[in-house]
Structures are given as structure tokens and as C-alpha cells.
């Protein structure tokens, strides 16, 4: 076995103890005589798994009983459609903040459902910063305000979340559980699982229950949150494997000290990288300082040839996934919760050496 | 390790060699230094997996280039909504054959989208048989005709598929790949993966490409087949783990002799059980003989007390999942492709002994 340092933007590195446990339980889950993938989602054994996954998220994120926690198919992309279908009042509108590619996709789906006000757009600055509170003004009649808390492509995030008159809806796919937040400040939080929560093919939706109440009759049952709230996440067969891995990850996160510990570790990991990036003009960090993500760190080098060499030599040194998103190029280091500090230290060492040889 | 005989209706038993391979590759997939769950769905390594999964299905089911093969989120329940959204012409209608609970759910979602003609309904016969060809007459203007090829709850199937003027759409969740069929006879075939294809959280959709062409602008991008056909199954992050397991299952199915071998084995397994059920009035098989499923075999005993004891004693003898669906009660043995003939033989032996003691 030769595990490498995996900087993939997602699906992304998982905690090694989680993988080891999944491996050890593969043929016989807790004496059931079958794998977790082979059992009824309505049996007692699996019921404890899905309830345990929900309870773990509730403890870690301090989610009150006023919120439902749902495990739904697909990832954030499916939610881009489900959110306006459920939350956009007929004849009403929604406010969207456009901070990059993921916000843009959410806007595209919402426009099919109803009226969308793009209340801020970072396009002219290449989506390299999030707006300040003073730059945002919201529509008085909006059904909700939508943000993407962390954009993986630019490598930017909202350091603080805007205060909004309408319920705040946040795509937290790439930074959920990376820090302690106040869930009560949101109407709905959603995330594709494949960064901090588990494998792909699963969306976690945390919504204030009243958000699910006023859905038009024209929306298919399967796409209504209310349908999935009645028998929580068991209206249909959920992605039983992904929910199981999510439960193991929640348990691992708690053992590691919960979200305060994750936040501290994530800030330290990011600081190590940004310190090197700020130390020499050889590196050209992309994101505006105030908006720098602690999950996805992006930078350029002096030319594409040098960037290609950087990615190639890093891979040879056991560090994979550092190529920037195909739409923007450059370098991107994704350092989610499960990414070890040793990997960041190794990258910084590699960077110093690369700079010495090529600077 | 103590594997039991797992008669679960789904999620269901998987081939042991598939589980063993998944276990052995858990920490390091083919020298990549990471698990299959931790890698980009757009990288070269994963590309070979998803393309291999599609190619495997195409070889096994003999699917021509006129059809797309898509890996979509959710299972059949999500397709119940997506099918009318994509295929129901505005102002048009669709014909549905109602053979049980799964057909019923498909009908409920279709009615939200447009006009539905229920052309046959098995309700008065407790959904214990499929219709004969002579009983079916179709609407001249229907956009499509929908059937469920195998109903898991009643334990019935279409032995032969109806000839229809409009494209035939079939929910094959519980019997896909259980026998050789002529895909060209269908406009669209779909299946939740969690019986013969893999774990839950994945739907396979096989559709004649022209079926995806005429979708109203009001349908969200994510719910259009055309969206997922452009960059096949990579519009968003697919359920990478489930697609990987599906690929391993397709390879296993080919090694075992493909669909002709599966069909022969499945018919033999079912015949063993039906032979015992027909041998003594102690057993009361549910399904009409002509419609008997070879995937889900259902029967009653003389009273619920006896049925409860049967299920309990079978479990103690290492056979789990034999309780009938909660909506109908009784006994159900689900014997999908991966269920071994030895398990059926063990069940028949157990039945003979149970009959001797309680008959």
C-alpha cells in the first residue's frame, strides 16, 4: 500500500481510519452476515446507521429540532433545481449572489423556475473575491437569498455570511464542517457530500422545516422536500453506502475534536500555504486576501509551462491533484478536513525547492 | 467471517468476488495511491472505470449505438418523475399498465406532469398477475407506454413484453440483466441499481437517443436526459462508488457466462422453489402461474403466526430477508442474479423440514 498526498478538489481524500473500517466491515457488517450495501434500508441494522449519521451531523453542527436533516440523491447540482422548485413562491423572486461557477449554475436552474435577481456579480474581477456586506442590497420581496459559501474554482469564500431579510440559502458543498457556524442563521444549507462528508452521489440538506411547506402542486413528489421529510430520507432507497461512510466520517470528526478542532487545523494548514505564497513574487496567489478560501488554495506561476512542470514534478514526489480547474488553469491545492497537515508541509517543502530551482 | 444466505428484496446480495475485490482495492485503487471514492471523476483513472461500466452493460445487454446508457442519481423513484418530464409531449398523454405498487408510484408522478391513461389495472386481483396481450389496448396518441417488468411485492412479471404503438418504457429495477432481452423493442429501460446491478443511489437509464429531443423549456436542466447525454453521465459528479461496483458486477456477470447463463441459472433457482411450493397445500404461492417472477417468489402459510415462525426459524438457520413486504405480509424469497443456488437448496431443505414439523 502506498497512499499519496491527494489534493483533489472532489471527490476528495477521506480519513484513513474511515477507509480501514469500511474495508474491515466489507463482507460482514457488525455480525449481520452481509455487507452494508446488501441490506434493506428499512431493517433495524441500517436504521441505526442512517439515524446515527443524522445524529452525528446534528451534534457536530449543533442543529436544532427546528431543522430537518435530509440525505438526498445526487449532489449540489440536483439541489440547484430543487431549491427554487421548493422555495420560490409563485410569482415571487429570489436573490442570488454570483461569486463564480457554482453560483452561476445555481442561477441558471433558478431562472428556469422563476424570477432571479443577481444582486452582486464578481465576473469583472474574475470571481476572485466575495462581496463585502456593504456591497449587497437585497430585494424586499425575495423568497430567499442564495450564496455559495466557498467557490472551489477561484478559491474564495465568504469569511462572514451576509445578514439577509429573506431566508439565507447556502451551497456549502466545499466547506461544510470546515468550521463552526451558526445554523440558525440559515433557512437552508446544502452540500454535495464528496468533499468533507463522504463519497459522491449524496446531498445533505439541512432546512428549517417551515421552508418545505408551500410547494406548488405542479412539482413532482420526488422533488419536494416535504416528501422526504415524512419518513426521513427513506421515501425511496437512499444511497446507503454513502450515508454509512458519512456516519463514519462524522464519528471521526468528533474523535478529532469536532468543528472547533477542524477549524483550527484547517486555518493552520491554509496559513502554511499562504505564508509561502506571500513570501516571494515567484508565486502569484489568485484570491483576494480577504476572501481567501481555507479549503481550496489557488495560485499561478510565471507561465503555463512552469505550471505544467510544477504539477508533473509534484506528482512524481507523491502529491496528486494540484492542477487548477480546467476553466481557469494554474495550481490548486484542495485541503479539506481529511487532508493531513503533513501533506501541506510536504507541499511547502516541495514549493521551496521548486522555487530555488526555477526562480 | 460468517456470510449468510441473504434473501433481501433490495438492496440485495452482491457477488462475493465483487465484494472481495472492492475490499482489496479500498486503500489504493490500481496503484493510484487513493481509493476509488477519493479521486476526480474527470481523471484518466476514473474515466476508464465509468467507460468500462457502460461498455460492460452494452456488451451484456447487446445495446446498440442508437441508445444512450446513463448513470443518474437516485433510483427508479426519481425516474418516475424524470420520464414524464422528458417524454410526455405537451398536451399529450401516456399509457400506464398498473401491475402493482411500483407501477402505481410511477403513475402518481406522471399524473403531476400530464394526462395518464391507465390501460390496465390489476387491483381487483390484488396485483397477482400481469395482463395478457389480448387484454391491452393502447391510446392512439400516447407519447409512450409504461410497464414495470417485474413487481417485487406481488412477485409477478411480464413473461413477454407487450407490442405497443408508442415507445415502450420499462421499469426493470428488479429484473434487469436477469435474462436476455431485445433492447431494440424499448424506447427506454430504467433500473435502480440495488438488485442486479450494484448498490443503491444509482439509476441506469438506457434510452433511444431520439427520446431525449423534445423536452419543454420549463424542465430544469438537471432533470433533462439531454443534459446528461452531452458529456455522458459527467454533467455532475456521478455516484462514483456505485458505478465502480456496477462495473465489477458486469465483469462478474460476463465471467459467469453473460445473460443466457444468468437466465438459465435464475430459471433453475426459481423452479426449485416453485416445485416445493406446488408440492403441498401447506404452501400457498401468491402469484398467478403464468406471471410468476423468477426474481421474487412469494407465498403464504396457514396464518400469520406460522409465517412469523417460519421467518424467525429461517433466520436462525442462516437465511435472512424472507419476510414479505410490509404492505402484503407473507413470505418472499428474493433470488437475484448474485443469489447462489446453494441458498435456494438450503431454503427448500428448510421448508421440507418446517412442513414436516408444522404440516
Image (cartoon, coloured by chain):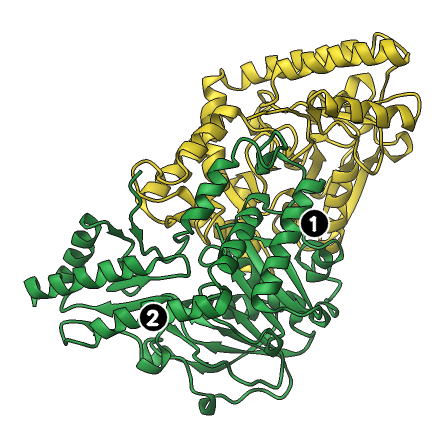
Chain colours: A green, B yellow
Q: Nearer the viewer, residue B79 or A210?
A: A210
The answer to whether any part of residue B175 appears in the image is yes
**Image position of A135 with respect to B61: above or below:** below
- In which quarter of the view is residue B48 placed? top left
**Which residue is at a point 49% across and 30% down the rendered structure image?**
B19
Task: Name the residue tied to disc 2.
Answer: A268
Check disc 2: other Cα within 10 Å, few if <14, some if 14-19, many if 20+: some
- In which quarter of the view is residue A33 placed? top right
**Which residue is at a point 18% across and 62% down the rendered structure image?**
A349
Judging from the image, what secondary structure is the residue with disc 1 in? loop
The answer to whether any part of residue B188 appears in the image is no
Answer left or right for B16 relative to B137: left
**Image position of A43 with respect to A220: above or below:** above
**Which residue is at a point 66% across and 31% down the rendered structure image?**
B174
**Where does the image place residue B213, in percent across and percent down from the top left?**
53, 49
Check disc 1: other Cα within 10 Å, few if <14, some if 14-19, many if 20+: some
**Where does the image place residue A139, in percent across and percent down from the top left?**
58, 87
Answer left or right for A209 relative to B182: right
Q: Earlier in the sequence, mark 2 or mark 1?
A: 1
CA distance separating discs 2 and 1: 39 Å
Task: Name the residue tied to disc 1.
Answer: A234
**Where does the image place residue A141, in percent across and percent down from the top left?**
64, 85
**Image position of A118 with respect to B306: above or below:** below
Question: CB of mark 2 within 8 Å of CB of mark 1?
Answer: no
Q: Nearer the viewer, residue B359 or A332?
A: B359
**Where does the image place residue B85, in percent across and percent down from the top left?**
64, 52
Work out which quarter of the rendered image holds the N terminus of chain A and state it: top left
**Image position of A281 with respect to B262: above or below:** below
Task: Spot the residue most to the right.
Answer: B303
Dots 2 and 1 on the same chain: yes
Judging from the image, what secondary structure is the residue with disc 2 in? helix
Amino acid at each position: 500500500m502506498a497512499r499519496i498526498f491527494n489534493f483533489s478538489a472532489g471527490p476528495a481524500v477521506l480519513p484513513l481510519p474511515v477507509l480501514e473500517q469500511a474495508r474491515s466491515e466489507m463482507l460482514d457488517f457488525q455480525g449481520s452476515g452481509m455487507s452494508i450495501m446488501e441490506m434493506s434500508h428499512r431493517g433495524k441494522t441500517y436504521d441505526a446507521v442512517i439515524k446515527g449519521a443524522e445524529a452525528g451531523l446534528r451534534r457536530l453542527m449543533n442543529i436544532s429540532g427546528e431543522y430537518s436533516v435530509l440525505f438526498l440523491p445526487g449532489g449540489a447540482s440536483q439541489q440547484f433545481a430543487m431549491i427554487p422548485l421548493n422555495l420560490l413562491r409563485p410569482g415571487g423572486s429570489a436573490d442570488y449572489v454570483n461569486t463564480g461557477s457554482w453560483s452561476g449554475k445555481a442561477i441558471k436552474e433558478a431562472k428556469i423556475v422563476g424570477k432571479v435577481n443577481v444582486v452582486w456579480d464578481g465576473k469583472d474581477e474574475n470571481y476572485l473575491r466575495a462581496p463585502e456586506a456593504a456591497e449587497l442590497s437585497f430585494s424586499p420581496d425575495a423568497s430567499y437569498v442564495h450564496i455559495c459559501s466557498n467557490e472551489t474554482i477561484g478559491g474564495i469564500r465568504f469569511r462572514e455570511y451576509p445578514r439577509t431579510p429573506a431566508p439565507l440559502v447556502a451551497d456549502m458543498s466545499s466547506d461544510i464542517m470546515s468550521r463552526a457556524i451558526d445554523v440558525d442563521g440559515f433557512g437552508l444549507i446544502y452540500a454535495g457530500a464528496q468533499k468533507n462528508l463522504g463519497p459522491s452521489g449524496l446531498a445533505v440538506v439541512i432546512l428549517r422545516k417551515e421552508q418545505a411547506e408551500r410547494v406548488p402542486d405542479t412539482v413532482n413528489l420526488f422533488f419536494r422536500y416535504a416528501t422526504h421529510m415524512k419518513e426521513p430520507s427513506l421515501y425511496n432507497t437512499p444511497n446507503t453506502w454513502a450515508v454509512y461512510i458519512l456516519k463514519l466520517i462524522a464519528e471521526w470528526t468528533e474523535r478529532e475534536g469536532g468543528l472547533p478542532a477542524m477549524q483550527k487545523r484547517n486555518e493552520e494548514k491554509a496559513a502554511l500555504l499562504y505564508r509561502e505564497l506571500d513570501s516571494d513574487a515567484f508565486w502569484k496567489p489568485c484570491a483576494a486576501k480577504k476572501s481567501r478560501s481555507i479549503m481550496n488554495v489557488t495560485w499561478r506561476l510565471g507561465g503555463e509551462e512552469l505550471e505544467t512542470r510544477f504539477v508533473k514534478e509534484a506528482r512524481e514526489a507523491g502529491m496528486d491533484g494540484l492542477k487548477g480547474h480546467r476553466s481557469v488553469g494554474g495550481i490548486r491545492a484542495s485541503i479539506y478536513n481529511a487532508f493531513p497537515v503533513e501533506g501541506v508541509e510536504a507541499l511547502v517543502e516541495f514549493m521551496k525547492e521548486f522555487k530555488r530551482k526555477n526562480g
